[in-house]
Amino acid sequence: MSAPDFLHSDDTSVAILETSPTRYPSLAAKIHFHKKVTADNAKHRGIHPIVALDSHNEHLAPLIAKALPSLPRKDSNSPTISIQASSGWWLAKKKPDFVSVTRGPGLFPCLASGLQTAKGLAVAWQVPLIGVNHMQAHALTPRLVHVLESTKENSEREPAFPFLTLLVSGGHTMLVHSKGLTHHSILASTTDIAIGDVIDKAARFILPEDVIMASKDVMYGRVLEKFAFSKGTELFDYLPPSTRAEELSRKPSEWGWALAAPLAETRAGSKSKAMEYSFSGLGSAVERICTQRGDIAMVTDERVDLAREVMRVAFEHLASRVVMALGAIGHDDGKITTLVVSGGVASNQFLKRVYVISIHELVTSILIIIIANYNPSSLRAFLDIRGYAHIRLNFPPPSLCTDNAAMIAWTGTEMYEAGYESELSCKAIRKWSVDPDAEDGGILGVDGWKKRP
């Protein structure tokens, strides 16, 4: 089957995904087309809704037109459509089985723009529409990666449910117990701002003005990472906290400042053990340090140190709740074997290189080290010796960590195979939980779904 897909936030993306491709019998799936255009928000130093919407309206139709010639060739068993190539020739192509599109959560005008376009294609082709929750899509991305790398059409999709998912981006921070395709229980989420947001905001204070002005990327977290690790993260000497007390303690810098771990009022305080994330205090601390130091007094080496410390504190805060969750679920009972880390922040190489935390509530601390281009045997041995041989770490490739159409196409595929379709009357959803216990009922709790008999 093939599935054109559209993704909408500040990115406009189109993909064509085919499972069990006829022309590639050895593959379980193939992406025939995948392109993305990001709105130019540079002068606003952040995503501007009107700029994002204008970008969608400008680029969506041309991207679709560019994608259609990449549809698989017709075969004797499939309905066909005629597509005009850039050469002017008409091509007989396999008609898509369905159209999937991001329905939410996100910027409502941008979501609506893509949803209406997808409805038009679904009506024109007389195929089903699948409105996808894009946070669900992030959680399922490793299953797409597995299928793309598989040579067996009927191979079991991995990671198999259940698994833990850490969704980290500029708009979301949540730790999820992924129990099934549409059942993702939220174990911890941010009570204020997302981790990607605090890193972006910290970057605006830490980065020299000339670096910000020279950047075309308004996701300043990526710029901050390059600034902090200009020679690569492997040269950064990181020592993980060996105890819970050490994790919660401040680490004074040579410049006289120190950042506190979020929710660390007291070592035994209720907030320090709460299953929640909080990053606003960290952002305020960075702003205070930079304001007090001043642009002139703050030399490059100090800015680099502060950039690294912000990421260290933020990432250890992420990891602390992962370990708490594993302890609460029962990390050694064989039920949870995989931790998926997905979303835009998951492409951060420092997060991949070192992701470490320990807590005193566990008999044995969990030590998770994630290294880009690592030696699998050495990492496996390291986890084994710490008593966590069953925990597998799964990071999608950088191109699939950030918002992209391929993950929406894949999630649409899994929902379609499970018998779910969206009604043509469905609307875009600005806020949409993945948790069935949430007020909106989660993925299947919103209006607009129908189940094939």
Image (spheres, rainbow, N blue to C red):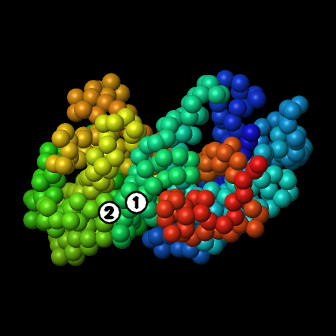
Residue at (46% x, 42% y) in the render: 162
Mark 2 vs mark 1: which is more N-terminal? 1
Amino acid of disc 1: Thr
Mark 2 secondary-structure assignment: loop
Along the horizontal axis of the image, is 79 left or right of 24? Answer: right
Q: Quadrant of residue 201?
A: bottom left
Q: Position of residue 230 (x, y in %)?
A: 31, 48
Do the residues under discs 2 and 1 have CB atoms within 8 angstroms?
yes
Q: CA distance from mark 2 to mark 1?
A: 8 Å
Q: Position of residue 239 (x, y in %)?
A: 17, 44
Residue at (57% x, 40% y) in the render: 144
Q: Camera-side residue: 180 or 340?
A: 180
Residue at (31% x, 40% y) in the render: 331
Q: Quadrant of residue 28?
A: top right
Quadrant, the N terminus:
top right
Amino acid of disc 2: Tyr
Relative to 267, residue 384 above or below: above
Q: Position of residue 371 (x, y in %)?
A: 33, 37
Residue at (65% x, 28% y) in the render: 153
Along the horizontal axis of the image, is 86 left or right of 368? Answer: right
Q: Mark on residue 256?
A: none
Q: Camera-side residue: 240 or 365?
A: 365
Mark 1 secondary-structure assignment: strand
Q: Quadrant of residue 432?
A: bottom right
Question: Which residue is under mark 1?
Answer: 173
Along the horizontal axis of the image, is 308 left or right of 57? Answer: left
Q: Circle 1: is it few (<14), some (14-19), or many (20+) Cα within 10 Å?
A: many
Question: Which residue is under mark 2?
Answer: 277
Residue 345 appears in the picture as rendered:
no
Residue 254 appears in the picture as rendered:
yes
Q: Camera-side residue: 93 or 130?
A: 130
